[in-house]
Amino acid sequence: MIQVRPFQEQDSTQVGILIADCFSQYNLEQMEQTEKPAYLGPFYNVRSSDPAHKQQIAILIQAPIILVAQNEKGQICAVLRATHDRILTLCVHDFYFFQNIGRQLLEEYELRMHKKGVDNVKVAAPLYSIAFYLRMGYKRSTGIRNTLTFPNGSLPCQPMKKRIAAAQPNLPFQEGV
């Protein structure tokens, strides 16, 4: 059973590793290993036991809104970082793909923002995730752009947005209704 809940400070290491692994696997897969540190920045050291590295990651993952999905063993399997109107990060561990965990996190975030009166949500979607956001009702707002990574890099992304003011939360399926 997957539980969606707000981020807690003790989640920092697991969330940092998940973000680094997803970013590396899906955004940097074509890149030479020697180039990856420049694109990962401090996340390159996410598995370090050095307290300074751990502190740096804890600071970097902070965002106004962070939701995590946790499995029954307490392991973080997905994370959504956002502001009130912009998704910053949505990462799902590949073992949990196609189990609607990304959908759960996104719908929970959208519902919270809808209740706060937010009309539109934006995302700079990595190219591999465009199909997911389209299925979730997001529309392309411009052509492909480059988004900056850590000091030395930029990666292509698709700016997208969704109007959530009139959105209704997905209701649970009821057989016979």
Image (cartoon, helix red, strand yellow):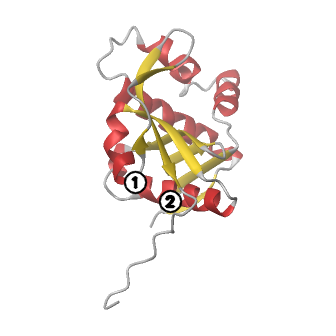
Relative to residue 55, is residue 44 drawn left or right? left
Relative to residue 141, is residue 14 drawn left or right? right
Instruction: Give the structural element (helix, strand or loop) at label 1.
Output: loop
Circle 1 residues within 10 Å: few <14, some 14–19, many ≥20: few
- Residue 79 image position (x, y, % from top left): 52, 46
Q: Quadrant of residue 14?
A: top right
Identified by mark 2, the residue type is Glu
Q: Looking at the image, is 59 positioned above or below residue 149?
A: below
**Mark nearer the N terminus (1 vs 2):** 2
Identified by mark 1, the residue type is Met
Quickly name the residue at label 2: 107
- Residue 146 image position (x, y, % from top left): 45, 19
Residue at left offset 43%, top offset 56%? 103
Instruction: Give the structural element (helix, strand or loop) at label 2.
Output: helix
In 3D space, how far apart are the residues under numbered discs 1 and 2 (Cα atoms)?
9 Å
Residue at left offset 66%, top offset 63%? 115
Q: Which labelled disc corresponds to residue 78?
A: none
Tag 1–tag 2 contact (CB < 8 Å):
no
Q: In which quarter of the image is residue 32?
A: top left
Q: Which labelled disc corresponds to residue 136?
A: 1
Report if residue 137 is visible in the image.
yes
